[in-house]
């Protein structure tokens, strides 16, 4: 009997390991498919948690009628859980360009539906199997505590997060990680079958097919990444993202997380980005390049500089850039593999020019290079007559309102730090920012320096006129909010533009979700509402940390596993401590709500006072503390609900429903429209409502 019980617990732990690794890989895959859009993280969490909750409710309805769950049933469900991860990863890769037009941007609702249906089989089964574990264990040992399912699952979750964050993300590819993390579950699934059936034809066949599926994923890893047109010339998985080089005829394009960074056919852009800035300087000596474009270093070479510091966070990007000759080594070049914002903060070197070569700031990772804090930092690292230059998407004849507001926000964010600003219109709008006067006659400046150019000399006067420059300047709106780290106006505009582009709005979906939440809250009791609000706080806080981390550090692709693990790791000690409490459970529930409010208050004050000076450790400790308090509450609420299978499904469902809602509301409503600090304030308000509900329902005793 104990052997069978231990076999089931091993399956629970192994399922936790495999599920967390798959969740983190799924996030990274979707980030790579949708160009690093951080809102994807929230949609994945929302769908994952919602489907888990649906599976748990489905199990509750079935188990109310079917009271027996055999070990064989557990074994088959566990084998299915082992079989599905490589299928899910392959489907994410192969179906993206089938469902959507290759290379096109995708709207909110299609992404929501796409992620939902691709994750549905695995997540629904994962939610369904948890109550089945409890039923199977209570068939073996009547009175088996439901909290032990929660604790065992957390042991697996934490183990999976740790293994992924400290080993798999650095050492293996995604489908290799799926293979390695699924092996314990494959073994546990096989061993949970009764001894007299374990070596039967059906079990051996099912186990063998599952093993073959895992191996097939490893062997077809590269094949699954081949583009529909052209071929995959280069591929590397790095801690910072996925680096690919696609070849189409004689053209090579380098992608990072699905976003094109270099192309062999963009000499005009290279000339504009370099010469517009450097032509303003009499004798430049030191230049900082934040990322680069094809052909840029060849243009910089014409200025005979003493030093060119080229920053690229991911070493694989610069390696691929040199390998395929997007960029070429020149005298004085120093390659720095570091976050550019962190480098600027610590260096004492002063530059004649800082040239930013980044895509449009459509993500928080990119937006951090277009905020007031960054512009102030960049200005402090320029010489007295130094120049800051970057580009944003331009226009031919008509400037659309969303783009006008974005340009205005960036312009208004620059004005406190630079006396002179010049915007040069074109297919890309070049920002030139310095304290000394700026000359808009670029060809004349280049001629004076005897620097040749192919495109500027031939096309500049025809495309760029004083009237066009003045007209663009007059279109800017001085009332548009500035773009700040903790109140990212530019991201708010980008978010609105994302919906406007597809003539949609998040309002309908949010209203439907609010109505469903209202119906659900009307049907639950006080203990479930506390877990609902705690789940909301837990995942809302996790989303806040993810976005704040991206704002201040900028490489969430690397540390998403570490953050998720921190928010999981507190659940285990919290749940264990909660099981030790046998008296005054409602009082402890009441007190822990106060702790959650206090922790959120500390988070707000820390961000307000310290911002980008906070170490990574702070975010991890905060995540651990939040999850520990939430984990402590779960067994208390479970015991108050009766500690039976029905109570387990209801408490799990409340926790998952709150977590799903917290994920979506925080990311889609609170952060874009309110900002990080105000979003945290709303979470405090929710927990205050939870306190009132508990006070009016039970008082503070018992």
Image: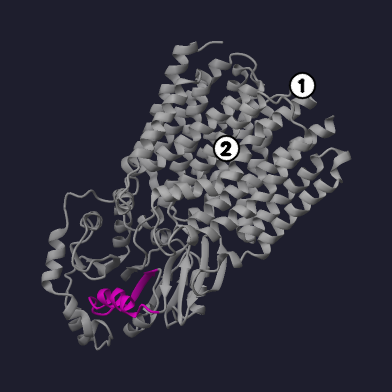
Name the side, left or right, on which 154 lies relative to 686.
right
Q: Over which residues does the magenta segment extend?
A: 265-290
Q: Name the residue under label 2.
A: 52
**Residue in the image at 20% along x and 61% along y:** 399
Quarter-of-image position of residue 167: bottom right
Instruction: Tell which circle, 2 or 1, labels the residue nearer the N-terminal end.
Output: 2
Determine which of the numbered discs, if any, sits on residue 142 in the image.
1
Total count of labels: 2
Pick the front one: 15 or 114: 114
Q: Are marks 2 and 1 in contact (CB under 8 Å)?
A: no
Determine which of the numbered discs, if any, sits on residue 428 in the image.
none
Pick the front one: 231 or 493: 231
Quarter-of-image position of residue 464: bottom left
Name the side, left or right, on which 113 lies relative to 502.
right
**Residue in the image at 47% along x and 28% along y:** 533
Quarter-of-image position of residue 7: top right
Residue 245 within the segment the image draws in magenta: no
Residue 473 in picture, x, y percent from top left = 15, 62
Name the side, left or right, on which 25 lies relative to 658.
right
- Residue 538 appears in the picture as rendered: yes
Residue 284 within the segment the image draws in magenta: yes
Q: Is 308 situated above or below 217?
A: below
**Residue in the image at 18% along x and 62% along y:** 419
Residue 303 in picture, x, y percent from top left = 32, 83
């Amino acid at each position: 009997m104990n052997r069978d019980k231990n076999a089931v617990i091993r399956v629970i732990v192994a399922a936790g390991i495999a599920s967390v690794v798959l969740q983190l890989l799924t996030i990274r895959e979707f980030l790579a498919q949708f160009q690093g859009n951080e809102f994807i993280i929230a949609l994945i969490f929302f769908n994952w948690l919602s489907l888990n909750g649906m599976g748990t409710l489905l199990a509750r309805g079935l188990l109310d009628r079917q009271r027996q769950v055999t070990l064989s049933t557990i074994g088959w469900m566990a084998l299915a859980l082992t079989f599905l991860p490589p299928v899910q990863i392959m489907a994410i890769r192969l179906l993206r360009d089938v469902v959507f037009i290759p290379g096109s941007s995708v709207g909110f609702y299609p992404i929501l539906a796409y992620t939902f249906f691709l994750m549905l089989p695995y997540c629904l089964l994962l939610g369904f199997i948890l109550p089945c574990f409890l039923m199977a264990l209570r068939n073996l040992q009547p009175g088996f505590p439901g909290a032990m399912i929660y604790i065992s699952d957390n042991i697996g979750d934490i183990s999976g997060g740790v293994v992924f964050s400290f080993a798999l993300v650095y050492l293996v590819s995604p489908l290799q990680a799926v293979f390695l993390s699924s092996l314990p579950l494959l073994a546990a699934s096989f061993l949970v079958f009764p001894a007299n059936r374990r070596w039967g034809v059906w079990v051996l066949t099912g186990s063998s097919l599952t093993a073959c599926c895992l191996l097939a994923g490893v062997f077809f890893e590269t094949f699954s990444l081949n583009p529909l047109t052209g071929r995959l010339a280069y591929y590397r998985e790095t801690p910072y993202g996925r680096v690919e080089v696609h070849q189409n005829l004689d053209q090579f394009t380098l992608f990072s997380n699905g976003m094109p960074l270099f192309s062999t056919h963009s000499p005009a852009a290279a000339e504009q980005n370099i010469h517009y800035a450097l032509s303003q300087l009499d004798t430049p000596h030191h230049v900082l390049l934040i990322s680069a474009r094809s052909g840029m270093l060849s243009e910089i070479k014409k200025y005979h500089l003493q030093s060119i510091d080229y920053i690229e966070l991911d070493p694989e990007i610069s390696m691929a850039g040199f390998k395929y000759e997007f960029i070429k080594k020149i005298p004085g070049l120093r390659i720095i593999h570091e976050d550019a914002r962190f480098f600027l903060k610590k260096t004492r070197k002063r530059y004649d020019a800082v040239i930013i070569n980044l895509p449009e700031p459509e993500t928080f990772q990119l937006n951090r290079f277009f905020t007031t804090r960054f512009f102030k930092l960049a200005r402090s690292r320029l010489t007295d007559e130094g120049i800051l230059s970057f580009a944003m998407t331009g226009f031919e004849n008509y400037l659309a309102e969303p783009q006008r507001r974005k340009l205005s926000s960036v312009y208004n964010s620059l004005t406190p730090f630079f006396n002179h600003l010049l915007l040069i219109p074109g297919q890309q709008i070049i920002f030139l920012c310095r304290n000394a006067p700026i000359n808009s006659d670029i060809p004349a400046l280049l001629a004076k320096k005897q620097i040749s150019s192919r495109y500027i000399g031939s096309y500049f006067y025809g495309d760029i006129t004083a009237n066009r420059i003045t007209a663009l300047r007059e279109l800017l709106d001085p009332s548009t909010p500035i773009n700040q780290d903790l109140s990212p106006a530019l991201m708010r505009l980008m978010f609105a533009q994302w919906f406007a582009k597809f003539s949609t709005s998040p309002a309908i979906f949010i209203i439907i979700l609010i109505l469903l939440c209202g119906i659900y809250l009307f049907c639950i009791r006080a203990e479930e509402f506390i877990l609902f609000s705690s789940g909301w706080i837990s995942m809302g806080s996790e989303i806040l940390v993810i976005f704040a981390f991206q704002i201040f550090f900028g490489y969430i692709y690397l540390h998403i596993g570490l953050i998720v693990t921190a928010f999981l790791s507190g659940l285990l000690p919290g749940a264990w401590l909660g099981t030790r409490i046998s008296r005054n459970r409602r009082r402890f529930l009441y007190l822990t709500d106060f702790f959650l409010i206090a922790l959120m208050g500390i988070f707000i004050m820390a961000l307000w006072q310290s911002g980008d000076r906070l170490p990574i450790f702070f975010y991890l400790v905060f995540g651990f503390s939040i999850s520990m308090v939430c984990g402590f509450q779960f067994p208390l609420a479970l015991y108050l609900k009766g500690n039976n299978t029905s109570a387990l499904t209801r408490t799990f469902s409340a926790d998952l429903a709150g977590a799903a809602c917290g994920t979506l509301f925080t990311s889609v409503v609170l952060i874009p429209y309110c900002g990080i600090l105000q979003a945290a304030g709303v979470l405090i308000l929710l927990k205050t409502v939870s306190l009132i509900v508990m006070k009016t329902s039970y008082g503070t005793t018992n």
